[in-house]
């Protein structure tokens, strides 16, 4: 191969078959493989476009080089959004591998060159990596970390694609995923999707706007309080309440006495989401206790369980140096009735834990000062912490690191980025 490293011909035309022999050669490593990630990558071929969205997003965080052979075909197949999502996964996996190589020297020079060349074919905006000659490996790792975490350009571009995607399931699922990457300043991008004709998409957009916590959208959402679609109406009432708009009681009362049992079921769901500490909502729920419809009564039971759990006030300690992300996660948990505290270094985490005695600890392994694993070890020595749930956050999938975390006292782990949705999903198994 010449010094200019011309891309292999098999990768140039988007519609040509990809060269599996070349992929095997470039992406074979002697490192360990995370079985679940590889299994997830292999499952892509048997999934529908809609069902590929979430695995591709997850593989961007946990996939290994071995996963790329299963991901790469989707860079040239399916909807525009899915192609972009697959390319994003490939780019993130390679960036993460190059970052790890700066520390562990997993790659030979030729293989590293091949990876860089392949990476630049997927994302020309990373062209500066070709000439990056920083002498300090720690600085190079930092550059890779920044690139791995930078999803803003992908987010904006993906939203444009979703608007045009023909599959409403893809649009609806993608809205939820993209909302995880966004801040309040990007609310306008989500608002564009409120014009979508599919109720599921619109409901997910409304819920995501609530998650972002931007109260500027309240006036826009009020018109959906009486939407003809039951799902949109219920999601709107929940979201408005979470955004501190309190004028929803008349609309809930109408839903409770509606002839359609699906509407009454949705009313019970809304009350379960926002009824903790609210006597007027609990009184409404009592009106549905003896409803003739079985699905309504089931939702009433679920609503009561959810309200009870929230009113118990599960205590969560978030320990990470990423203060803005902690605040965002804390805000979302507060909407669900949890009590949260934040610590940004190991010493503060130990002090906050002693003072507030959390039932859940979410902690970054790379916490400044006393590291995350040492914090967990010290807390596990104390009797009151024996029953607590510990979730550790890691930068990448690593069997030795995860095994060490579990032996130290962690119950489970999350690969960064650490989001409210990921934590909540893990907690379902423990609370």
Image (spheres, rainbow, N blue to C red):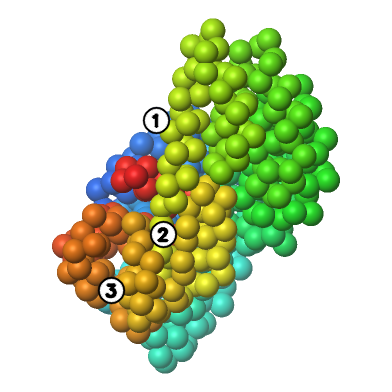
Which residue of the protein is positioned furthest toward the top in this rendering? 292
Q: What residue did someone put label 2 on?
A: 316
Q: Nearer the viewer, residue 9 or 257?
A: 257
Residue 78 is situated, as x and y percent measured from the top left of the image, at 56, 36
Residue 61, placed above or below residue 376: above
What residue sits 45% from the left and 39% below the top?
308
Would you identify the image quadrant in which residue 372 lies? bottom left
What residue sits 33% from the left and 75% below the top?
350
What residue sits 28% from the left and 57% below the top?
388
Residue 116, placed above or below residue 231: below
Q: Nearer the viewer, mark 2 or mark 1?
A: 2
Q: What residue did someone put label 3 on?
A: 375
* Circle 3 Cα neighbour tier, 10 Å, few/some/many (<14 / 14–19 / ≥20): many
Q: What residue did someone put label 1 on?
A: 46
Q: Secondary structure at mark 3?
A: helix
Marks 2 and 1 close (CB-CB < 8 Å): no
Res. 186 visible in picture: yes
Q: Is 348 on the left or on the right of 208, as rendered?
A: left
Q: Is 82 on the left or on the right of 115, as rendered?
A: right
Q: Secondary structure at mark 1?
A: helix
Residue 145 is situated, as x and y percent measured from the top left of the image, at 46, 73
């Amino acid at each position: 191969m010449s010094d200019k490293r011309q891309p292999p011909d098999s990768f140039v035309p988007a519609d040509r078959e990809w060269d599996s022999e070349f992929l095997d050669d470039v992406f074979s490593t002697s490192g360990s493989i995370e079985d679940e990630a590889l299994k997830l990558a292999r499952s892509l071929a048997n999934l529908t476009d809609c069902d590929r969205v979430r695995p591709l997003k997850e593989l961007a965080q946990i996939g290994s080089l071995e996963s790329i052979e299963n991901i790469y075909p989707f860079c040239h197949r399916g909807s525009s959004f899915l192609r972009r999502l697959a390319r994003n996964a490939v780019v993130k996996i390679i960036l993460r591998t190059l970052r790890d190589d700066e520390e562990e020297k997993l790659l030979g020079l030729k293989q590293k060159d091949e990876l860089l060349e392949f990476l630049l074919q997927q994302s020309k905006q990373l062209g500066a990596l070709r000439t990056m000659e920083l002498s300090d490996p720690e600085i190079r790792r930092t550059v890779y970390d920044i690139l791995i975490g930078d999803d803003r350009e992908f987010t904006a571009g993906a939203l444009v694609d979703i608007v045009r995607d023909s599959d409403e399931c893809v649009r609806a699922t993608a809205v939820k995923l993209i909302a995880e990457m966004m801040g309040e300043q990007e609310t306008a991008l989500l608002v564009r999707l409120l014009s979508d004709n599919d109720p599921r998409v619109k409901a997910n957009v409304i819920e995501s706007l609530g998650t972002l916590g931007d109260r500027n959208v309240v006036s826009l959402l009020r018109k959906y309080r009486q939407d003809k679609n039951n799902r949109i109406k219920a999601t709107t009432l929940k979201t408005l309440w979470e955004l501190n708009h309190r004028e929803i009681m008349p609309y809930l009362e109408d839903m409770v006495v509606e002839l359609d049992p699906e509407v009454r079921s949705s009313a019970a769901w809304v009350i379960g989401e926002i009824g903790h500490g609210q006597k007027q909502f609990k009184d409404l729920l009592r009106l549905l206790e003896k409803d003739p419809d079985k699905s309504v009564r089931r939702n009433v039971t679920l609503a009561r369980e959810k309200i009870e759990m929230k009113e118990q006030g599960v205590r969560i300690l978030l320990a990470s140096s990423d203060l803005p992300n902690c605040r965002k996660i804390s805000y979302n948990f507060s909407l669900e009735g949890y009590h949260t505290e934040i610590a940004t270094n190991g010493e503060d985490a130990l002090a906050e834990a002693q003072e507030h005695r959390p039932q859940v600890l979410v902690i970054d392994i790379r916490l400044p000062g006393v590291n995350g694993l040492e914090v967990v070890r010290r807390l596990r020595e104390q009797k009151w912490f024996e029953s607590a749930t510990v979730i550790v956050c890691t930068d990448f999938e690593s069997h030795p690191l995860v095994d060490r975390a579990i032996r130290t006292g962690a119950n489970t782990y999350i690969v960064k980025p650490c989001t409210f949705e990921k934590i909540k999903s893990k907690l379902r198994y423990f609370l």
